[in-house]
Image: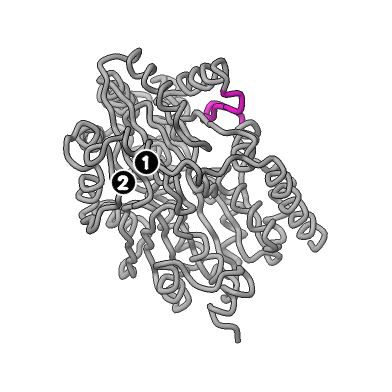
Amino acid sequence: MQTIHDILRNEFGYTSFREGQQPIIEAVLTKKDVLAILPTGTGKTLCYHLPSKMINGLTLVVSPLVSLMEDQVTQMRANGEKRVAHLSSMLNTSEKYDIINHLTRFKLIFVSPEMLTMSFILSKLSKMTISLFVVDEAHCISQWGHEFRTDYLRLKDIRKTVGNPPCLALTATATPKVEKDICYHLDMKNACVYRLPVNRNNIFMTVEKYETQTEKEIRFDELITEAETPAIVYTGTRQKAEQTAESLQKKGWRRTAYYHGGMTKEDRLLVQQQFLYHDIDIICCTNAFGMGINKPDVRSVFHLHVPTSVEHYVQEIGRAGRDGRQSTAYMIFCDEDVILPGAFIEEEFPESGVITEMLSHVDIVGKTFKEGALLFQLPEKQEKMLYYHLEKRQLIADGMFTEQASSTQVADELIHYFEERKKEKHHLLWQMRALAETAQCLREKVAHYFHETVGDKPDWCCNKCHSLMMYEQTLNKSQRIECDPQRDEQAWQTTLKRMLTVCDGE
């Protein structure tokens, strides 16, 4: 029987594991529940891909984004993995049924939490031998599950429905509180927790505050001119992403595009692929972009706003320098950039008056929740959130308000719960602002947030420890790799050849 080292060498072409991978894989193979907290770029995918080759049955991978699933499946197939597929909205109905009705063909299936709540999919999966239940980007349980993607909170029950297989949860960042949240909502009672420090020594962090948006934009123009590409530019809104891309194009950055959640899935996937394969140098985007994207040579990450939490900030700057080369994270902001995310937090939750009125409405019993949502004009995200919490408290069954629906007690409970969630999210934003405005070492402040220490600082730490001008002057520009069209064409040809080989073999 092949050992994990044999498979690592023969199947993946590596001679040794990266830090943390081997103990995680060994724990998974002994059927333990595992929470792995590994920085971006440290090879989390291998932690379930390799075991899937050694265990009988199906490995089910819960993934948050269609683009992420598509990218992972494409890359696995390009590297020779034939028995992998994803179930997502990118597939038409017949394609979904073809996969669902032939699950024995596959070793790995990628799926979103929302897709897992569909009865016909869950019914088919429950009849299979699921040997490993993987939750990729597991921090989404804590960051998204309590609000607009409440199906993340159903994963505990879904895991039981498919036979309660061993669970592997993977994330790049998790405070001790988020760690507990993940374990609770996945029912990982005695999980083995493997945590590596979030610190990435090859990323120089710089944060600058300006009085006005105009001053900030002037400074951005200066910095982007000197910055290395490929680059990701994060903005606070979809409109700003489009405006920034358009502005850069007018100034000569032709290989620039924008990306946000308001685009069609097809357009998002196209832009993502263009960025991955060097057709785009700069991508201007909201935080909808970047999660799990396997592009090791991103040299610069810009924030033209203040992220809503330190976790978001660390995840996003962690998309730079995954190849280990020196990279830079820039944040340029003004006071206005803190007001906007605070307003977004307020808009996430239904108003107290709406909850009280809905649950005291004389005719609410017997109506569908959809009718109630239309009556009170709930936005889609609030509608999903409120549905989950009312169903959990048995005020809704099969989409209908029950006899218990007229409940002032539940209304008071929900109002209190949502107020506490708002306070928590505002506190996370306050902590991020405190980091952005600190005069102390940024690296140490980030480490402290995650209850860690830095140890020996790198030669180039942050602009609180070193001058950004000196950093830019000292950076060895001769080592910067320019885009080589011939190399890019060869990369495309190699990838295409591998994909066609896999397709021919299926």
Location of mark 1 (residue): 474
State the residue at coordinates (74%, 57%): 498
In the rendered image, the residue lying farthest to the bottom is: 1
Position of residue 404 relative to residue 12, above or below, is above
Location of mark 2 (residue): 460
Residue 285 makes an appearance in the image: yes
State the residue at coordinates (45%, 20%): 240
State the residue at coordinates (39%, 40%): 328
The image quarter containing residue 347 is: top left
What secondary structure characterizes most of the magenta part? loop
The quadrant of the rendering that contains the C terminus is: bottom right
On the image, the x and y values in percent for residue 447 come to 24, 51
The quadrant of the rendering that contains the N terminus is: bottom right
Residue 194 is a magenta residue: no
Residue type of the residue flagged with mark 2: Trp
Which residue occupies the foreground of this view, 234 or 156?
Answer: 234
On the image, the x and y values in percent for residue 236 come to 39, 25
Position of residue 340 relative to residue 308, above or below, is above
Image: magenta residue range: 253-264
Q: Are marks 2 and 1 in contact (CB under 8 Å)?
A: yes
Residue 257 is a magenta residue: yes
In the rendered image, the residue lying farthest to the right is: 504
